[in-house]
Amino acid sequence: MSTFLFTSESVGEGHPVRNRDDVENRDSDLFSEFVFLPPIFTCANLKLRVGLAFAFANIDKICDQVSDAILDACLEQDPMSKVACETAAKTGMIMVLGEITTKATLDYQKIIRQTIKNIGYDDSEKGFDYKTCNVLVAIEQQSPDIYQGLVQSGLDVENIGAGDQGIMFGYATDETPELMPLTLTLSHKLNKKMADGRRDGSLPFLRPDSKTQVTIEYKNEGGALVPLRVHTVVISVQHSADVDNETLRKALKEEVIEKVIPAKYLTPETVYHLQPSGKFIIGGPQGDAGVTGRKIIVDTYGGHGAHGGGAFSGKDWSKVDRSAAYTGRWIAKSIVAAGLARRALVQLSYAIGVAEPTSVFVDTYGTGTKSDDEILAIIKKNFNLRPGVIVKELNLFKPIYTKTACYGHFGREEFTWEQPRKLEF
C-alpha cells in the first residue's frame, strides 16, 4: 500500500509570523517533491501531509479580526459599504489603514479596543492591553477610479463588476464530515480547545497566543485521500511564567490532544513536539509585528488544494478575492456532497470591472463519477458566478465576517457557503 504524510497548521488568536512567506516557504519546502501541472499541483511520492493552524490571538489573526470587525460595523449600518481595511500591530499599538466608502458612522476606538478585549488581551502582563494600547487610524475613501469600474454596466447590484482581477480556488475532500482536510480540521480544533480551557479556567496558565501543526499519514485511493494515523503533533502556546514545562506538556497532551484527536488516529509511534522552544511567555504584539492577510493558507485549506494569493479579511463582498473564494468552496463542496467526486478543486478568475468570470476550471483528481468536462458543465448550469449574484445567494451583505477571521473560513456550518447546493444534472 502506497502512503504519504501531509501536515497542516493553525494559529491562535494572537501569534506573530515575521513575514508573509513564512507559511508559504514552509509549503514550498514540503512540496519540493510535487509534480506541478499548472494551474494546480498533484502529489507524487510524498510520505507526509501537514496542516498548520494559528489561534485567534496570533498577532496576524488579531489584525484579521480587527479589519473584519470594522467591515462588520460598516455593513451593520450600510450593506453597500465598500471596504478595504488593513491592520498592523506591534507592542502597545494598533493601526488601521485603507479605503472605506460608507454611510456608516464608526467609532474606530471602540470597535478596535472591544475586539482586542474579546480576543483576551486585557492585561499588560499578557504583553498587550486593550485599555492602554495606542490606536492609530489612517482611513480614506475608495478611489473613484475603482468605483467607476464597478458600476460601469449600471448601478443594479447584479451587474456590478468584480472589484479586482485575480484567481481564486475552492476545495473539498470527503476525508471528514466537514469535507475539509483532516490535518487542518484537527489543527484548528486544538487551538480552540486551548482557548476554551483558558477561558473556562481549566487551563489557567495558558495565554492567548498559540499555534498548532498536525502531520497525518494518508493513503492515496484512486485520487482520494484516506487518513491512516496522526504522525506528528506540534503545539506552541503562550503561557504564564509560573508554570513549568513538565506540567504544561502533560496538560497539552491529556487535556487538549487526547480530547480533540480521535483515539483511532493516535498510535504509540505518534510524535509529540509540545512547547519545543522551551518557553513562550512573551507573545502577541509584544513578541512580533502583525499585519492583516498573512495567514492565507491557515484561513483556507492548510496547504491542500491551491490558493490564488489574495487575503480575505477587511474586504467587502465586491472584492472577489473573498467572495469568489467563498463561492469556489461552495461549488467544490456541492460537487463532493452530491457524490460527483470524492475530491474537487475549483478555480475561478475575474477581471476588474467585469461581472462574469474570465474562466472556470475544475479538477477532481481522478475521483469523479463523471468527467471533469461534464462536471464543469454542471457547475455552469447551477451557479451564476457574477459577484452581484453571489452576494445575494450567499447573503454576504450581512455583518458575519469577524467570526470568519479565526479558526478558518471553511468547514464551519454556520456559514452560507458551507451549505451545499442541490445540483441539477
Image (cartoon, grey):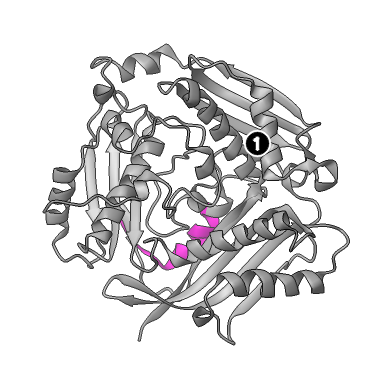
Q: Is residue 40 above or below residue 218?
A: above
- Mark 1 burial class by Cα count in 10 Å: few <14, some 14-19, many 20+: many
| Residue at horizontal 55 percent and vertical 59 percent from the top | 188
The image position of residue 328, as x and y in percent, is 31, 46
106 sits to left or right of 94: left
| Residue at horizontal 29 percent and vertical 28 percent from the top | 388
Q: Number of callouts in the render?
A: 1
Name the chief secondary structure element in magenta.
Answer: helix
384 sits to left or right of 168: left
* Residue 37 in magenta stretch: yes
242 sits to left or right of 275: right
Q: Farthest residue toward the right?
A: 242
In the image, 171 versus 105, the foreground residue is 105
Q: In which quarter of the image is residue 161?
A: top left
In the image, 129 versus 361, the foreground residue is 129
Q: Is residue 293 above or below residue 155?
A: below
Q: What stretch is highlighted in magenta?
A: 24-38
> According to the image, label 1 marks what residue?
115
Amino acid type of the residue that numbered disc 1 sits on in the rendered structure: Thr
| Residue at horizontal 29 percent and vertical 52 percent from the top | 420
* Residue 324 in magenta stretch: no
Q: Quadrant of the N terminus?
A: bottom left
Task: Tell me if I can see residue 237 in this picture.
Answer: yes
User: SS of the residue at dot 1?
Assistant: helix
Q: Is residue 401 above or below residue 108?
A: below
The image position of residue 280, as x and y in percent, is 78, 58
In the image, 173 versus 352, the foreground residue is 173
